[in-house]
């Protein structure tokens, strides 16, 4: 789960990392209250979970209160990369000659967290790593022993930080690692962090990704997730325990198992021409019951681009009769004018076939193999 | 021969009294696996399908002389269950549980290196060596003994491929699900190395997906060391960038975590790459 900048900054403050004084605005009317509270210039930052905000005019500098008002009005409810800006952070602009990049991130290959710093800042760290490999330094952290101060000093030395800053940098790195640990993050990033005499190190930007698997022990962050603005389909998916990603094609794929779901998506692209593509990734998970199947189909049918559906189940823990019951119920309940190609294999597959055959629903068609199911769905889309 | 498990596997089930644990204990017994004990704290003295239940892994190991453990406990207790199995010096630990936090897995992985245990998973379907040894949830009726080794990150896709191979009259030496999480106990290249050294295995099927560099490293291993032919399939060519596709680990986050980059790596390594699962049988 990605956090908004203002949320990440709250976690930074709790971890002992300084951030600029700021005000969060969710409604243009709230700006009036700030008329005498701001010291100019200020940063006006649209809160959105998209990269490259500055490039997309999501971050601006205001020199007068009138500028703040018009910028906030413009930013609220515009969107970047299809994501709506629903709040704006107004912050003191911090002047400094010292800016760095610093992060703690999970390294899948090393299977360890890694502390990364750079004297280049502002851009994506992957780009920095490509363009200026010598301007970047990292230290792997043993999760059993934690971050040692000598590791921070090594980075400071590698990047030629002034020696009076080494101790301060270790304090920042330790606070960042604490933040990473305490909130079960997979990434905590400050890009850039500035240094001033008044504040010490201060985080001008903030990016945190929290491990979805750890949300059960992060009650505060879970509450933020529930407040996230979601489409009706995404909401239903979350509630019914299916994993759903909307795409832009015409063939809805309802599958058990993540890799199998991707495989069937890939096959619709492989067998179809350039105009045919999957409409979604939808994994109903193991052991799904009829209710979950009804909800899954409800989600898929609610997408007006969908012209055909493939429902392919390889029953292990999942029982095919339960799946078939759910499919028939969904058609009785929703009466969609969309054809679903049903493929059932494994546990109770024959029972499932019987349920589908007996229902005599005209828009249900059975398939035996993966390629047959995919080709039937493509033919359905082409018939229009 | 086979890898990891065989007819002398003596298995304990951690979480044997839970719904999944009970059901799959019965399935494993039916298949012929020697399930010698189960563990659920505070339930020691109970019996499940005529298998004795112990309060701790240590007690179960002491009484049953087990050499393998399979973990079915819910995610918030699974980290503790894995550490308990490592400290009890279980040689092979297979964790089926999905949803263990990544940081917990990093601690477990670091701890494993100083231990006598090997971990398969988490978030995996387990291991099957036909005709009579299965540890985990892989269905036994779609596989017969043979000379194909299978290593995979996923569950249902693996069953689909096993079924396709079964219908094409291929048999399997061992099928290993390594798990779909970003951090797992045993890597693809470790399993490849074991298949390469296993006399029964003649060819290997590798099933991968988007996310991480596990397949890139496996391809590198094949290019440098592997003597047996490998057929690979990678799921997720049509997956968008930066979005998690079900599995915690299935997310494109950089150039070589895409399906195309992985497919290219396998082609460069001399492996055959299948376009879709049904294509695998003809490439073998």
Image (cartoon, grey):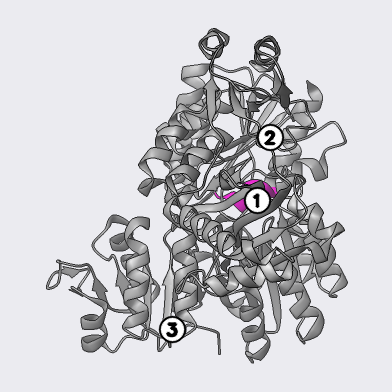
Relative image position of residue B280 (x, y in whole percent): 74, 64
Q: Which residue is mark 1?
A: B251
Which disc number belongs to residue A50? 2
Residue B168 visible to the viewer: no
Which disc number belongs to residue B117? 3
Q: Nearer the viewer, residue B179 or A1?
A: A1
Prevailing SS of the magenta stretch: helix
Callout 2: few (<14), some (14-19), or many (20+) C-alpha neighbours within 10 Å?
some
On whether residue B195 falls in the magenta region, the answer is no
**Residue at x 36%, y 63% (from the top left corner):** B78
| Chain of the residue under the numbered disc 1 shown in the image | B
Relative image position of residue B51 (x, y in whole percent): 22, 74
Residue B259 visible to the viewer: yes
Q: Nearer the viewer, residue A45 or B203?
A: A45
The span from disc 2 to disc 1 (Cα, nearest Å) is 16 Å
**Residue at x 45%, y 33% (from the top left corner):** A224
Q: Earlier in the sequence, mark 1 or mark 3?
A: 3
């Amino acid at each position: 789960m990605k956090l908004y900048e203002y949320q990440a900054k709250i976690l930074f403050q709790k971890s002992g990392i300084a951030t600029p004084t700021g005000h969060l605005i969710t409604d243009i009317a709230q700006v009036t209250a700030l008329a005498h509270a701001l010291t100019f210039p200020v940063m006006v930052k649209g809160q959105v979970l998209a990269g490259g905000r500055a490039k997309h005019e999501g971050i601006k500098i205001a020199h007068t209160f009138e500028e703040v008002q018009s910028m906030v009005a413009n930013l609220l409810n515009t969107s970047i990369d299809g994501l709506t800006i629903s709040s704006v952070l107004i912050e003191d602009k911090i002047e400094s000659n010292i800016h760095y990049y610093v992060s703690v991130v999970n390294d899948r290959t090393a299977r360890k967290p890694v502390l990364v710093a750079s004297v280049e800042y502002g851009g994506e760290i992957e780009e920095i790593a490509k363009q200026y490999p010598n301007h970047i330094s990292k230290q792997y952290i043993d999760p059993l022993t934690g971050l040692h101060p000598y590791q921070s000093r090594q980075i400071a030395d590698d990047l030629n930080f002034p020696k009076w800053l080494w101790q301060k940098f270790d304090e920042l790195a330790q606070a960042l690692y604490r933040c990473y640990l305490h909130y079960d993050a997979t990434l905590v990033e400050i890009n850039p962090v500035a240094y001033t005499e008044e504040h010490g190190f201060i985080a001008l930007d903030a990016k945190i990704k929290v491990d979805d698997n750890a949300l059960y022990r992060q009650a505060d962050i879970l509450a933020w997730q529930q407040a996230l603005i979601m489409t009706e389909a995404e909401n239903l998916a979350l509630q019914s325990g299916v994993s759903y990603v909307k795409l832009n094609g015409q063939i809805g794929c309802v599958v058990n198992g993540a890799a199998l779901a991707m495989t069937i998506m890939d096959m619709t692209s492989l067998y179809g021409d350039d105009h045919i593509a999957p409409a979604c990734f939808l994994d109903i998970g193991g052991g799904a019951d009829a209710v979950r199947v009804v909800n899954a189909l409800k989600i898929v049918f609610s997408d007006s681009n969908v012209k055909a559906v493939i429902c392919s189940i390889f029953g292990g823990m999942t029982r095919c009769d339960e799946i078939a019951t759910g499919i028939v119920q969904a058609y009785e309940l929703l009466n969609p004018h969309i054809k679903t190609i049903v493929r059932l294999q494994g546990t109770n597959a024959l029972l499932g076939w019987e349920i589908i055959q007996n229902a005599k629903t005209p828009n249900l068609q059975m398939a035996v193999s993966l390629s047959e199911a995919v080709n039937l769905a493509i033919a359905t889309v082409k018939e229009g | 021969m086979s890898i990891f498990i065989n007819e002398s596997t003596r298995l304990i089930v951690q979480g044997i009294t839970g719904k999944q644990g009970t059901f799959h204990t019965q399935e494993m017994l039916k298949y012929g696996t020697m399930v010698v004990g189960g563990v659920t704290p505070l339930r020691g003295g109970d019996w499940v399908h005529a298998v004795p239940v112990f309060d701790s892994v240590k007690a179960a190991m002491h009484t049953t002389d087990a050499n393998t453990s399979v973990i079915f406990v819910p995610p918030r207790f699974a980290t503790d269950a894995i550490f308990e199995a490592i400290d009890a010096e279980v040689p092979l630990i297979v964790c089926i549980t999905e949803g263990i936090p990544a940081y917990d897995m990093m601690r477990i992985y670091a701890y494993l290196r100083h231990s006598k245990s090997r971990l398969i998973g988490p978030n995996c379907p387990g291991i099957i060596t036909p005709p009579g040894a299965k540890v985990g949830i892989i269905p036994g009726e779609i596989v017969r003994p043979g000379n194909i080794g299978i290593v995979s990150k996923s569950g249902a896709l693996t069953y689909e491929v096993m079924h396709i191979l079964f219908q094409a009259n291929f048999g399997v030496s061992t099928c290993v699900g390594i798990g779909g999480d970003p951090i797992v106990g045993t890597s693809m290249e470790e399993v490849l190395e074991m298949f390469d050294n296993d006399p029964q295995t003649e060819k290997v099927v590798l099933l991968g997906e988007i996310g991480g560099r596990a397949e890139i490293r496996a391809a590198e291993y094949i290019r440098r060391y592997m003597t047996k032919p490998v057929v690979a399939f990678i799921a997720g060519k049509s997956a968008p960038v930066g979005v998690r596709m079900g599995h915690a680990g299935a997310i494109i986050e950089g150039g070589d975590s895409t399906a195309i980059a992985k497919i290219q790596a396998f082609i460069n390594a001399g492996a055959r790459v299948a376009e879709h699962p049904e294509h695998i049988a003809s490439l073998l």
